[in-house]
Structures are given as structure tokens and as C-alpha cells.
Image (tube, rainbow, N blue to C red):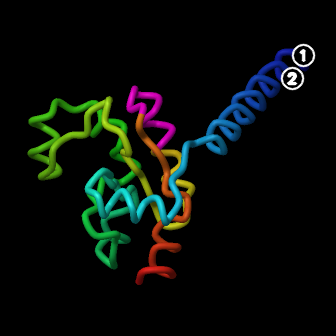
Amino acid sequence: MLRARRGRLGALFLQLAVAARTMAGAPTVSLPELRSLLASGQARLIDVRSREEVAAGTIPGALNIPVSELESALQMEPAAFQALYSAEKPKREDENLIFFCQVGKRGSQATQLARGLGYTGARNYAGAYREWLEKDG
């Protein structure tokens, strides 16, 4: 019995360690790079904060898809996505699909989720909305 428990705990610990490493390894974009991509129209920006947070302000041009909805949103048919979010659904091959949140954690989670679904150009704006406000707000 003890051995079985230890085995389950060991497996859980391993899963958590892998998840932590994966989150830490999320591809990121810096503020100067983000500004450049936005200025040239080469970035697709997705704010994964709640609708209430976004109502208080967001980065101009960002599409709001709360992180709790992201997995289902990225798996929708393009027409359903368009109807729900009033925007074109990102394509798996899109470069510079950039996620952000308030401080970086949900943006990192969103980036890993999107990459897991085949969105190879997904990256996290690690500075998040907090940095944007400090530098641009």
C-alpha cells in the first residue's frame, strides 16, 4: 500500500516537474520586439485575461480570449470562432501569435496550450500587461 502511494506521488511529482519546466520554457517576446511586430502588422495579439480585467484596459489591437476558453476556442471551426469572437481564427502556421495576461503566468500557460495544439508560432509576451502599462500607459 505504501509503495503504491509513493508511486503515485512520485508520478505526480514528475508531472509537476515537467509542467514547471515546460512553462519556464515557453517561447517569449520582449517589449521592444512586440512593439516592432505590432508596428509592422506582423503580430496577432491575444489577451487571455478575464473580460473584467480587459474592460479596465488592454494593449490596442488585442483579441480577448480568456485562458479558460482558449483550448475550446482554438479547436473551433473558423466560422464558429468568427461568430463568437468577431475575428478571424488564428491559423496553426501563423507566426507571431502572441499571448499575454496581467503578469505573465496565464500568458505562458496559453502559449504552451497553443503550441500543444500545433500553433508553432505561439509566444508569450512575458512582460505582460503590467510592463506595457509601465512603459506605454
Q: Which residues are magenta?
A: 111-120
The residue tagged with tag 1: helix, strand or loop?
Answer: helix
Is there CB contact under 8 Å for labels 2 and 1?
yes
Name which residue lies at 80% across and 28% down: 9
Name which residue lies at 46% across and 73% down: 132
> Which quadrant would the C terminus be assigned to in this image?
bottom left
Task: Identify residue for label 2.
Answer: 6
Name which residue lies at 22% across and 32% down: 76
Instruction: Determine the image quadrant of residue 55.
Output: bottom left
The amino acid type found where label 1 is placed reads Arg
Residue 119 percent location from the top left of the image: 38, 32
Name which residue lies at 73% across and 29% down: 12
* Residue 119 among those drawn in magenta: yes
Residue 73 percent location from the top left of the image: 27, 40
Residue 3 percent location from the top left of the image: 90, 16
Task: Identify residue for label 1.
Answer: 3
In this view, the residue in front, 11 or 90, is 90
